[in-house]
Image (cartoon, helix red, strand yellow):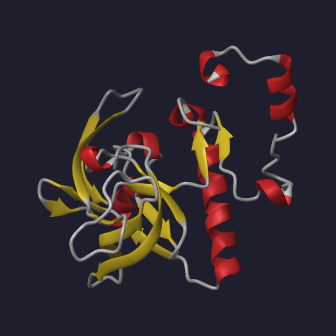
Amino acid sequence: SRLRLGKCTKTDFDLLNTRLYDINSYQLDPELERAPLITPFNCVRDAFNAKRTEQFSKETGREIQTFIARDSRQKAAVSGSIKNALLDLPFSHSGHLLGRLSLVYGMKVMLTENILVSAGLVNGSEGFVQDIRFSIDKDGDEFLQSCVVHFPQSLCENLPEFPNKNFPILPVKKDIHLRHSKTKKSFCFSRQQLPLVPAMAMTIHKCQGRTM
């Protein structure tokens, strides 16, 4: 709580300094290997999550599966260069729905939307991937239909037909409005994707109020 309130002591500061991480060297104390990385930069968060997802895949022998968002404009699917440009949009500019979501069975993920507040499934809730269902279109692109996630901290013990504290996460759809900073021209489109992101790293903003 002292870190959240900006009241860290010298002892706190010294402790945190022992846990600084150099993403280029990628060397961590084994005891901290599973601890989430906290960074002020979205690009560092994304790079670390990608690296840890790849490492988790190698450690477990499980395949990385990457699913793209369904982007449409005026009810028609976007294609070509526009499609690729939208998929590459930064997380903060895409309604907090990833253009490309890479998942591995058993990996740690985080919700980016309030799904079921009464059960504690809210923005920032963390869980582990248990099952993935997806479809493939004529171009070979894979789209998520649902993902079953185990949320250990859920307030709801049982959901009919699902193991304890397992919940199906379904795609959400958002209308996204982009505006060019120089030309002031706007571009609007709709995105459908699961409200999940890898949870091996998070920004300082996202970790506020958490127990560390």
Kindly identify the residue that appears in the image at 70 percent across and 58 percent down.
34
Direction from residue 178 to residue 23 in the image, left or right: right
Kindly identify the residue that appears in the image at 25 percent across and 66 percent down.
159
- Can residue 88 be seen from the camera position used here? no
Kindly identify the residue that appears in the image at 38 percent across and 54 percent down.
154
Q: Is residue 125 above or below residue 33?
A: above
- Can residue 75 be seen from the camera position used here? yes
Could you say which quadrant of the image residue 12 lies in?
top right
Could you say which quadrant of the image residue 86 lies in?
bottom left
Direction from residue 132 to residue 117 in the image, left or right: left
Q: Position of residue 133 (x, y in %)?
A: 32, 79
Q: Residue furthest top?
A: 7
Q: Residue furthest left?
A: 75
Q: Is residue 61 above or below residue 81?
A: below
Q: Position of residue 28 (x, y in %)?
A: 84, 55
Task: Report the label total.
Answer: 0
Quarter of the image where the N terminus is located:
top right
Direction from residue 121 to residue 197 in the image, left or right: right
Quarter of the image where the C terminus is located:
top right
Could you say which quadrant of the image residue 58 lies in?
bottom right
Q: Is residue 11 above or below residue 173?
A: above
Direction from residue 125 to residue 39 in the image, left or right: right
Q: Position of residue 201 (x, y in %)?
A: 61, 49
Kindly identify the residue that appears in the image at 37 percent across and 32 percent down.
180
Q: Residue furthest front?
A: 157
Q: Position of residue 143 (x, y in %)?
A: 32, 73
Q: Please name whichever residue, 116 or 89, is drawn nearer the observer in this view of the structure.
A: 116
